[in-house]
Amino acid sequence: MKERVASGVSLVIFLAAIVVFNSTFPAALNIAIALISVLAVFEIISALGLSKNFVLLVPSLIFSAVIPLLQLIPTQQIQADTLQQAAYFLYTAVIFGALILYHQVITFREVGVIYSMSLMIPSALETIISIRTLGGRHGMFYVIIAIFSAWIADTGAFFAGRRWGKHKLCPNISPKKTVEGVIGGFVLNIIAMVVFGYIFHAIYYAYSVEISYLTLVIIGFFGTIMSILGDLSFSLIKRSCHIKDFGEIIPGHGGILDRFDSVIFEAPFVYLLVQFLPIVVH
């Protein structure tokens, strides 16, 4: 437990540093997302036992790194979109070209899983950068909400489940998850989102901006559902790969995917929601 808490605190400090230095070094967030994407895709490929299959590994890792970094290129939006489309096209051509050239040692099933995961993970995490852009001068507040909503839901579920958990949620997928834990995740996440909003509204900006607490409650509620969906989805992947954790890079938590699986589902949801219901109401 101490190891888990210490690792959690370290992650929070890491995120806090990115927030603090965002104005002077905004590329830090892009670099961090690129690194997380690369490690996450590597963990998926390793879980499949294909980490030594360089013809699939190398293009997938390069693509995972490139997608979050493309927004650093100072171009017009249409050009940025074109670059991203070009990256998707090149990766697709390379990965399926490899399937044709090495079809005797590479199966379509392997290519299909790696291809889909390499598209999904960096594309989903890249929305965190888009959330910052969408939030304007309050962008990092939006980023904090998107990431912490996933983590807090998971934390609430973990501790409530340990304390009161009796009824299994999905025993065949994740034996430790309970209905009581899910309820704890909902409660803690909704409360935390409102508290974050109040701190930002009353303390940080001294009521000089308006906050939509309705949006924060929606994020707390539906964000918990997204967090559970992400957690269970990747738990099912681990079970099918016969592994307990995706890695050991984060002591007490496991691999990068063990910590960011819920964020992969949460961030796109927040990005879509705040386009219609902004957190900061000007």
Image (cartoon, rainbow, N blue to C red):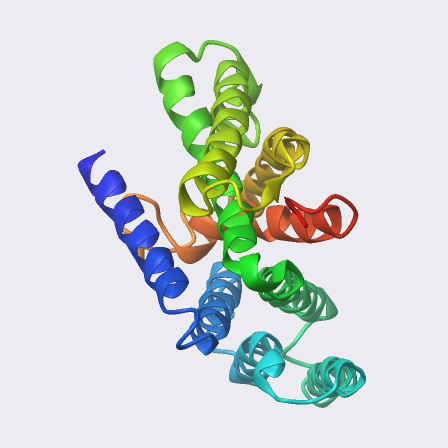
Q: Position of residue 43 (x, y in %)?
A: 46, 62
Q: Position of residue 181 (x, y in %)?
A: 48, 20
Name the residue located 50 percent from the left edge and 58 percent from the top edge.
140
Q: Position of residue 274 (x, y in %)?
A: 70, 48
Work out which quarter of the rendered image holds the N terminus and state it: top left
Name the residue located 61 percent from the left edge and 35 percent from the top edge.
216
Q: Position of residue 133 (x, y in %)?
A: 63, 66
Residue 37 in view, yes or no? yes
Name the residue located 63 percent from the left edge and 38 percent from the top edge.
229
Question: Residue 104 occupies which quadrant of the picture?
Answer: bottom right
Residue lying farthest left?
A: 2
Which of 208 and 44 lies nearest the eye of the viewer? Answer: 208
Residue 233 in view, yes or no? no
> In the picture provided, is 252 more to the left or to the right than 54?
left
Question: Residue 89 occupies which quadrant of the picture?
Answer: bottom right
Name the residue located 35 percent from the left edge and 49 percent from the top edge.
254
Vertical comparison of 110 with 153: above or below: below
> In the picture provided, is 282 more to the left or to the right than 179?
right
